[in-house]
């Protein structure tokens, strides 16, 4: 199985409004509620691709219950098993709100901070994680940290995965990323803003090379509509979709992470991993909510992703 960790899981709400304007009242024309947080999105895409996936992290309160109920119901595309190993907490799982402006296609994201996690709950999680690592073929550590979880949490979890010889992907930001990358994860998947905040450089190749020097075995930077830039021990590549797709980009990075991890577990070479990541990200932009992708767009884009040396 593949393991995904979402320490700050969320109940994701997506609202569609005809046109988003500050200081105005809006009529919501469509609303959706999904289990979310980056690692949950990665897990849902992995399961849809046919990989048995275990979701861990924290869940609590009424939103936590709702999230777990949705997780049990909802494998998009009816793929492989999605196993809930979330650790219960006393606090209440956060909500996030994505507001999609139908006139432009732009999305505005509002993320709650998350519940307070106690030292005992964090200790209970690390025990569950150590047990799950024994069965895992790969692990993804994704998203922000809720209050109470130590800022070096990802560094600790990366070291545990490396000690267990389980390939580990890290997708986070800020200080947890800075510390996590120094623990030498196999793959880090920052977006351009995260990469710039980490390295101080807005030039993606320079920033990715710098990020790799900080300890990551490989970097696959997600560049939005431009695709993915990878700096790896086997080479450097850019992978780009054949055309720019309009839609909701929330969760596109998570789908790219799922593509990279599934292809790694399947033993595919880097160019094929990047091709899958880019096609899945494009197909996610064409799906209305994070954690889902449009299968027809995926099949359509996959043969046309362009991979070039960087
Ligand atoms: O606050 P974080 O953990 O960084 O991001 C949370 C989040 O906005 O990211 C996903 C999209 O990538 C959403 O489904 C999710 O709720």
Image (cartoon, rainbow, N blue to C red):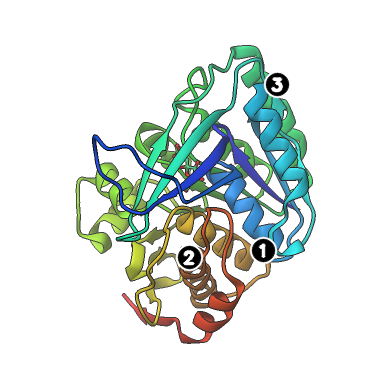
Instruction: Using the rendered view, name the quadrant where residue 125 is placed.
Output: top right
x, y percent for residue 148 = 51, 17
Helix, strand or loop at disc 1?
Answer: helix
x, y percent for residue 108 = 35, 46
Residue underneath mark 1: 265
x, y percent for residue 300 = 53, 83
Does the CB distance between marks 2 and 3 fall below 8 Å? no
Q: What separation in Å lies between label 1 and label 3 (alpha carbons)? A: 28 Å
Which residue is more in the foreground, 214 or 64?
A: 64
Residue underneath mark 2: 281
Instruction: Using the rendered view, name the quadrant where residue 178 is placed.
Output: top left
Q: Is mark 2 within 8 Å of ligand 1?
A: no
Q: Report the residue at 30% width, 58% height from top.
A: 209
The mark nearer the N terminus, 2 or 3, is 3
Q: Is residue 246 visible?
A: yes
Mark 2 or 3, which is nearer the eye?
2
Q: In the displayed structure, would residue 8 be above or below residue 194?
A: above
**Dot 3 crowding, Cα within 10 Å, few <14, some 14–19, many 20+:** some
Which residue is more in the foreground, 183 or 306?
A: 306
Helix, strand or loop at disc 2?
Answer: helix
Direction from residue 109 to residue 269 in the image, left or right? right
Q: Is residue 167 visible?
A: no
Q: Report the residue at 52% width, 29% height from top.
A: 153
Q: What separation in Å lies between label 1 and label 2 (alpha carbons)? A: 19 Å
Label annotation for residue 124: 3
Q: In the displayed structure, would residue 74 be above or below residue 56?
A: below
Mark 1 or 2, which is nearer the eye?
2
Q: In the displayed structure, would residue 108 be above or below residue 206?
A: above
């Amino acid at each position: 199985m593949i393991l995904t960790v979402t320490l700050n899981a969320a109940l994701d709400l997506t609202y569609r409004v005809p046109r988003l304007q500050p200081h105005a009242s809006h009529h919501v024309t469509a609303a959706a509620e999904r289990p979310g947080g980056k690692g949950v999105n990665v897990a849902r895409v992995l399961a849809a691709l046919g990989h048995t996936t275990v979701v861990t992290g924290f869940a609590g309160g009424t939103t936590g219950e709702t999230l777990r109920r949705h997780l049990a119901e909802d494998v998009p595309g009816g793929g492989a098993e999605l196993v809930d190993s979330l650790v219960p907490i006393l606090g209440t799982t956060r909500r996030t709100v994505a507001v999609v402006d139908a006139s432009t296609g732009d999305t505005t994201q509002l993320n709650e901070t998350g519940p307070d996690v106690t030292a005992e709950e964090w200790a209970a999680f690390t025990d569950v994680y150590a047990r799950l690592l024994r069965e895992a073929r790969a692990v993804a550590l994704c998203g922000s940290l809720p209050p109470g979880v130590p800022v070096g949490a990802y560094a600790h979890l990366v070291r545990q995965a490396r000690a267990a010889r389980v390939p580990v992907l890290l997708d986070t930001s800020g200080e947890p990323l800075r510390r996590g990358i120094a623990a030498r994860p196999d793959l880090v998947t920052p977006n351009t803003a995260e990469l710039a905040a980490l390295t101080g450089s807005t030039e993606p190749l320079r920033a990715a090379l710098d990020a790799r020097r900080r300890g990551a075995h490989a970097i696959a930077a997600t560049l939005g509509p431009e695709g993915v830039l990878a700096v790896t021990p086997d080479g450097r590549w850019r992978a780009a979709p054949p055309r720019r797709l309009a839609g909701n980009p929330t969760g596109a990075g998570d789908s790219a992470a799922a593509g990279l991890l599934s292809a790694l577990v399947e033993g595919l070479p880097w160019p094929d991993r990047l091709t899958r990541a880019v096609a899945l990200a494009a197909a996610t932009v064409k799906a209305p909510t994070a954690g889902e992708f449009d299968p027809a767009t995926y099949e359509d884009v996959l043969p046309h992703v362009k991979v070039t040396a960087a």
